[in-house]
Image (cartoon, rainbow, N blue to C red):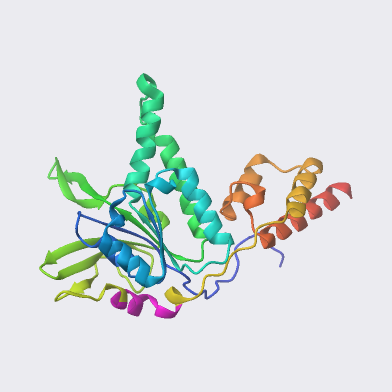
Amino acid sequence: MATKLRARDPKLVQPGKCKGLLFGASGAGKTWHALSFPVPYLIDTEGGANKRHYQAKLKEAGGAYMGPEDGSLNFDTILEEVRTLATERHPYKSLVVDSITKLYQTDIANEAERLGAKDAFGASKKPAIANMRRLVARIARLDMNVWFIAHEVAEWGMVDGQRQEVGRAPDVWDKIVYELDLTLQVKKIGKGQREAFVFKSRLTGFPEFDRFYLQQNGADVGYANFAERYGKDYIEAEPEPIVLASAEQVAEIKRLLEVVRVSEADIEKILSKANAEAWDEVTEEQAAKTIDWLAGKVRKESA
């Protein structure tokens, strides 16, 4: 029996690289844990990782450093950097943005200054939120482990009819925890003792409210404990660059869109599904499928 339903049979997929958020108080060990992941590419928005011990850890791992003097506080620069990491062959396996709080808050502050007296009803947050959405879409296509590092802030709720602090939360765009695989709260719990608390998770190996050691009796055990749960082979696999649509494919899509009726909403859905903002950001495969679909509509309308 024919059906118009669009759902497909479920498929078993490999987990791929981890995309997560680390948050916690200053000195909890967030950056150190993130830099324990293989061959890290560090985007340092605060300039704090130019200290000797961080630079030594990066150098030992074969990593690279991008600081404020390189444009790490500019969203457009970061987005272009992620695009390059996704489309070029390089030795890096992990991307660390430290801190995403600084990047996000700086974008808000810049817009608030631009708006001046016109800043009302959260208007200054809108560009920063839009840029966070763009960044999340870009890293979804990036075949690297990704850690965003955030400060922590008080989380408020109602207790017995009174507004009270009910915990701690990441100091960043509040929807990001729903966009990523994993959010860990990093805590210093004693001398030589640090742990990760599973704040939010989509991963079976990291059930919510679970916890594991990052440092135990002064020894760094965080990466080993994480890799055992997630799968070391996935984390350490060589990244595969994506191949973007050719100029000819982009031109053909635009040509077909001039001769076939496609709503703006449908175009937006196609681009959103591809985690792209424009036709030159879709992959070669996605472009080919779009061309086939548009050509089919042309034939149907011409019949």
Residue 40 in percent (x, y) is at 40, 65
Establish if 224 lies above or below 26: below
Q: At 56% across and 69% down in the image, what residue appears?
A: 240
Q: Is residue 113 left or right of residue 13?
A: left
* The furthest residue to the right: 303
Q: Is residue 238 left or right of residue 260?
A: left
Instruction: Give the overall secondary structure of the magenta segment.
Output: helix
Establish if 218 lies above or below 84: below
Find out whether residue 229 is within the magenta segment. yes
**In terms of depth relative to the viewer, which is nearer, 145 or 205?**
145
**In terms of depth relative to the viewer, which is nearer, 54 or 265?**
54
Q: Is residue 37 visible?
A: no
For the N terminus, the image quarter is bottom right
Q: At 27% across and 61% down in the image, what residue appears?
A: 52
Q: At 27% across and 73% down in the image, what residue appears?
A: 222
Q: Is residue 11 left or right of residue 47?
A: right
**In terms of depth relative to the viewer, which is nearer, 297 or 110?**
110
Establish if 286 lies above or below 233: above
Q: Which residues are magenta?
A: 224-233
